Image (spheres, rainbow, N blue to C red):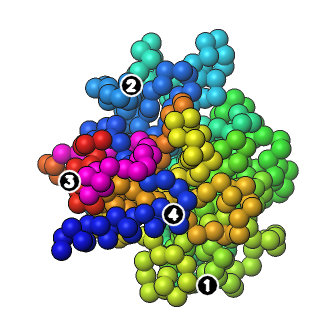
């Protein structure tokens, strides 16, 4: 009877793969149980083929030739706000290398940029609390290419955050060599609490919210010039082709707005793809347009959230290219695919090892619930990104050897210099892990399982995901 169930599971996997029109995926371990909370993976683009893993606790680690180097590339834990017990969205959240990194003699050849949560000297007021500050800073590499100069910090910008959550934190240089930054709406829930425009106690309706308030940096995609000096404080520049330059009462750094918690983003050519975490109902993926309004707190995806909000100016709200709903009673009523609780933005495959994956956007969902860890790997095919599919699309749930959801929190994605895709995971909820326990953070490379896969490997995959990862 057990063998019959196994073959039924194999049949189900085969059907899922056919529906997805994507090959079966396996997770090849790169670094397992050596990093605590990996929230990002980046390459320096300098020909070294190193991977840089951002740990939320305040460190950046180097993986070189498949091995984790013993000394962190950067350790700024001492500059972070104290961790909140149990669960925290603050910490070291973003990393980007200067476009000229590694090009000796060029401006920025030794520079990289980080986004982190720092303590605030003031707690603000009851109506306008300050929980912490978000910081975008520049660092330089030391004489050792695998170790940064801690003392080289140059702070480009800081801004107050009223609550501990919704900090976004993506940093990335576009093909225009400008730095793009995602910010959350300031946290709490509903973008209507104290510290949010029009917000206050008691869940008021009709408040504009930080994400719709263009006088604030929260709930936005920002675009700055790290080599300029015409921004506030003189540590960065504001490009003159930003959409709101010269408009009174508006922060000129803003590139797009109306976002709740844009957790992870990526450039694919000149396309900026941003995943935005929803409030109660919808998780979404957006293609970012210059000056675009993505709807939060008026809408979640294509669904109303607070239709009494009156934005200024009144412009069309841009719908996501893909959306799904949460595992909730309200989610079931939408008719959308129910997947998890929090989208994790990803990357587009541009490698050469698996040409059948070219142009596919790989992303994920953090977990089906907060505990236990059980994240899901997802994808959008090429036709969704190029606009030839019917939008907004349903995401594809990947056919993963060993099962999907994968039994781990899905925290982030990244590319190596060859365009291959990596995913960052962990099994402990708290950023510092379980007290006294070993680290559970892991980095995997996404690989295609050859077809037809050998029967024994499929059976083992159905029985034990961790065992498959060891075998691979």
CB of mark 3 within 8 Å of CB of mark 2?
Answer: no
Distance in Å between CA atoms under marks 1 and 3: 39 Å
Residue identified by numbered label 4: 18
| x 43%, y 82%: residue | 328
Q: Secondary structure at mark 1?
A: loop
Q: Is residue 180 above or below residue 434?
A: above
Q: Nearer the viewer, mark 3 or mark 4?
A: 4
Dot 1 or dot 3: first in sequence order is: 1
Residue 338 visible in the picture: yes
In the picture provided, is 379 more to the left or to the right than 293? left
Where is 333 relative to 315, above or below? below
Kindly report the distance in space between the C-alpha atoms of the residues bearing marks 4 and 1: 45 Å
Q: Which residue is mark 3?
A: 434
**Inter-mark Cα distance, 2 to 1:** 52 Å
Q: Residue at 60%, 62% (x, y): give it.
A: 285
| Residue 68 to residue 335: above or below | above
């Amino acid at each position: 009877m057990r063998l019959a169930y196994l073959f039924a599971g194999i049949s189900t996997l085969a059907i899922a793969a056919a529906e997805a029109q994507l090959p079966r995926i396996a997770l090849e371990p790169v670094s397992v149980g050596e990093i605590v909370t990996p929230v990002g993976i980046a390459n320096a683009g300098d020909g070294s083929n190193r991977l840089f893993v951002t740990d939320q606790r305040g460190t950046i680690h180097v993986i070189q030739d498949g091995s984790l180097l013993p000394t962190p590339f950067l350790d700024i834990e001492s500059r972070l706000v104290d961790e909140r017990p149990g669960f925290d969205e603050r910490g070291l959240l973003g990393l980007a290398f200067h476009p000229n990194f590694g090009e000796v003699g060029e401006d920025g050849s030794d520079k990289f940029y980080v986004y982190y949560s720092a303590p605030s000297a003031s707690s603000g007021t009851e109506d306008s609390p300050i929980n912490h500050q978000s910081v975008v800073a520049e660092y330089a590499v030391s004489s050792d290419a695998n170790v940064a100069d801690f003392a080289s910090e140059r702070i480009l910008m800081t801004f107050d955050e009223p609550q501990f959550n919704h900090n976004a934190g993506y940093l990335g240089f576009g093909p225009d060599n400008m730095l793009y930054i995602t910010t959350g709406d300031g946290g709490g829930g509903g973008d209507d609490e104290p510290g949010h425009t029009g917000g206050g106690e008691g869940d008021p309706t009709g408040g504009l919210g930080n994400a719709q308030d263009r006088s604030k940096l929260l709930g936005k995609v920002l675009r700055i010039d790290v080599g300029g000096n015409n921004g506030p404080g003189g540590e960065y520049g504001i490009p003159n082709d930003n959409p709101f330059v010269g408009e009174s009462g508006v922060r000129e750094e803003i590139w797009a707005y109306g976002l709740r918690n844009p957790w992870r983003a990526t450039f694919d050519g000149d396309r900026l793809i941003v995943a935005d975490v929803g409030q109660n109902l919808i998780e979404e993926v957006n293609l970012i347009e210059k000056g675009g309004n993505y709807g939060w707190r008026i809408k979640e995806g294509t669904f109303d959230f607070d239709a009494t909000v009156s934005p200024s100016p009144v412009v069309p709200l841009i719908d996501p290219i893909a959306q799904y709903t949460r595992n909730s009673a309200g989610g079931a009523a939408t008719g959308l695919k129910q997947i998890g609780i929090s989208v994790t933005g990803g990357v587009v495959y541009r490698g050469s090892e698996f040409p059948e994956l070219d142009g596919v956007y790989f992303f994920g969902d953090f977990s089906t619930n907060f505990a236990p860890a059980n994240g899901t790997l997802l994808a959008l095919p090429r036709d969704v990104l190029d606009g030839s599919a019917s939008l907004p699309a349903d995401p594809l749930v990947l056919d993963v050897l060993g099962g999907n959801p994968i039994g781990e929190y899905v925290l982030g994605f990244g590319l190596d210099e060859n365009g291959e895709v990596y995913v960052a995971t962990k099994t402990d909820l708290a950023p510092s892990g379980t007290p006294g326990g070993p680290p559970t953070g892991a980095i995997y490379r996404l690989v295609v399982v050859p077809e037809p896969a050998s029967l024994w490997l499929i059976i083992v995959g159905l029985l034990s995901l961790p065992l498959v990862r060891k075998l691979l």
